[in-house]
Amino acid sequence: MKQWYEALFENYSHKYENEIYTRGTLGECNFIEQEINYNKDARILDIGCGTGRHSTENAKRGYHNITGIDLSESMLRRAKEITAIEKLNINFLVRDARELSFNDEFDLAIMLCEGGFSLMETDEMNFQILKNADAALRKDGKLIFTTLNGLFPLFHSVKDFMANNTESGNAVCEPLSFDLMTFRDYNKTSFVDDSGNTIELDCNERFYVPSEITWMLKSLHFAEIEIFGAKLGAFSRNDRLTTEDFEMLVAAKK
């Protein structure tokens, strides 16, 4: 039986590009460039790349060693269509982030917009993704990812946030409940796929608090771990993480 995150992206690549959370690509890539000191030779691994929006933008900026992986063949087909139109050279591969075999190959790994991490059905699976990202990095390599901020639901309603951050035609998440024992949000997501079919899926995602993220990365021997608030399209080291941030931005260096 397919998990919800597999079924969601079976036929949703075009609709996905219209979701609110995909509109910050330019600003997010600005942050990525700064973090690797504009090194055009940096080898970049985009985990859970989807339709390749960050990989494509980075390639347009002259980064020529980019590998994008995703579990969804449909999303990668769209990614390849886009790169063909743009005449870009990106290595897109169908891979499960829990079963990567890369070893000491990349200078940077990114997982943005919950690209794999936090979507898995167990904490062990989520940790395995971090472990595999770590293994893929070279000495002094950097990992940049976003994840849902567990401090937010302690002070706010996730249901209200989701309702206020969608537009007509976007996926709708309701009813929605948050489990304080597991820090998981459970919801029924309704959306119209690229063929015009209305789909409903039972979904859940894991929220993490900063201390959990820090502990996991320390256990993987990352030497520098920094966590910031993740503002859509405006990632910045100047944004201290607060209870107002729905997502957190993590930058870790080996």
Image: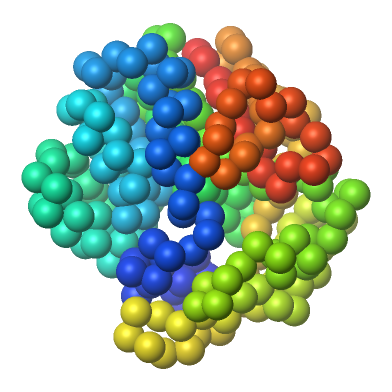
- Image location (x, y in percent) of residue 234: 55, 35
Question: Please, which residue is most extreme toward the bottom here?
Answer: 197
Q: How is the image coloured?
A: rainbow
Q: Is residue 13 left or right of residue 24?
A: left
One can see residue 220 in this view:
no
Is 148 situated above or below 177?
above
One can see residue 244 in this view:
yes
- Image location (x, y in percent) of residue 109: 41, 30
Q: Is residue 185 left or right of residue 124?
A: right
Q: Nearer the viewer, residue 49 or 156?
A: 156
Is 139 situated above or below 90?
above
Q: Nearer the viewer, residue 16 or 26?
A: 26
Is 213 situated above or below 190?
above
Write the residue at 75% across / 61% down: 161
Question: How many dots with numbers?
Answer: 0
Write the residue at 50% across / 78% down: 169
Q: Nearer the viewer, residue 34 or 128?
A: 34
- Image location (x, y in percent) of residue 64: 18, 28
Write the residue at 46% across / 83% down: 192
Q: Is residue 222 left or right of residue 70?
A: right
Write the residue at 22% across / 17% down: 41
Question: Please, which residue is most extreme toward the right here?
Answer: 155
